[in-house]
Image: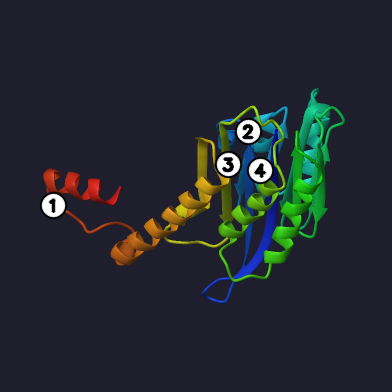
Amino acid sequence: MTFSICVHETYTDDDGTEQDRFGVAVTTRLPGVGTLCPFASESGAVATQSLVNVELGRKGVEYLDDGLAIEDALQSLLNADEGAENRQLHGVDAEGTFVFSGEECKDWYGHIEGENYTVAGNLLTGEAVVESVAEEYEASRDDDRPFAERLVDALAAGHEQGGDKREELHIQSAALVVESTEERVVDPYYEDLRVDATETPIADLRETYEYAVEGYEMAMELYEDAYDEDGMDPVDDGEDAASSDDESA
């Protein structure tokens, strides 16, 4: 019912330090996919789908944070899962990738394991969906465009190939999550986004991303100095404090 991509990239921050970033983007012909499938931390990214077991994603990221390698973390969870043959589980960490598609997933299902990325899907119109997601990501890997934007583009490529085949289900959803090892004063608002119920999930996710970027840039332009000082301008009394809190929320 879903297709998704997990990615690991390295980049150099403004101080010249090499950083890692991890991202997941996912869409399906059901509401609320962002609450179930994508998980990421500064240690890696995981997507759990098909007959979803949310704990595979939650615990998978926890295991990565504890220092387990992606293959060891996710395989150990599958080994303990009695419903593993109904699952799709894939992800990345800084050192490798892991992909699993159980034999009882619904056709078309399958996955691709590339260099520092994974793509998987089930109940799709065909293999071209995951192939297009992978091809779009690989073509954009060296672009200067933001990471989250390129993840949305990868989803769009799969969606254009038909995506989830259940056309009778018109209420859909999409989500993306990005995490980085970089320490930032304010995490970008546009790196953890969900569109929970819509007939146009990719277009709406893209629009949400664009608005979130605009909102982040406006906030940083207006309040960057205050953020750098670890808070908004100090206030003296309760009435002024309430007004200030409302403005900066």
Q: CA distance from mark 2 to mark 1?
A: 51 Å
Which circle's residue, 4 or 3, is located before the other in the chain?
4
Residue at 65% over, 50% down: 155
**Of helix, strand and loop, which one carries label 4?**
helix
Nearer-the-camera pick, 27 or 97? 27
Q: Which residue is mark 1?
A: 236
**Of helix, strand and loop, which one carries label 2?**
loop
Category of crowding for the residue at label 4, using alpha-carbon neighbours closer than 10 angstroms: few (below 14), some (14–19), many (at least 20): many
Which circle's residue, 4 or 2, is located before the other in the chain?
2
Horizontal and vertical percent position of residue 37: 64, 37
Horizontal and vertical percent position of residue 169: 62, 28
- Is 52 rendered above or below residue 116? above
Q: Mark 1 against mark 3, which lies toward the viewer? A: 3
Q: Mark 4 against mark 2, which lies toward the viewer? A: 2
Which circle's residue, 1 or 4, is located before the other in the chain?
4
Residue 174, disc? 3
Q: Is residue 49 visible?
A: yes
- Is 81 rendered above or below residue 164? above
Labelled pair 1, 4 in contact (Cβ < 8 Å): no
Q: Quadrant of the N terminus?
A: top right
Q: CA distance from mark 2 to mark 3?
A: 9 Å
Q: Is residue 69 visible?
A: no
Which circle's residue, 1 or 3, is located before the other in the chain?
3
Q: Which residue is mark 2?
A: 29
Residue 61, disc? 4
Nearer-the-camera pick, 31 or 188? 31
Labelled pair 4, 3 in contact (Cβ < 8 Å): no
Which circle's residue, 2 or 1, is located before the other in the chain?
2
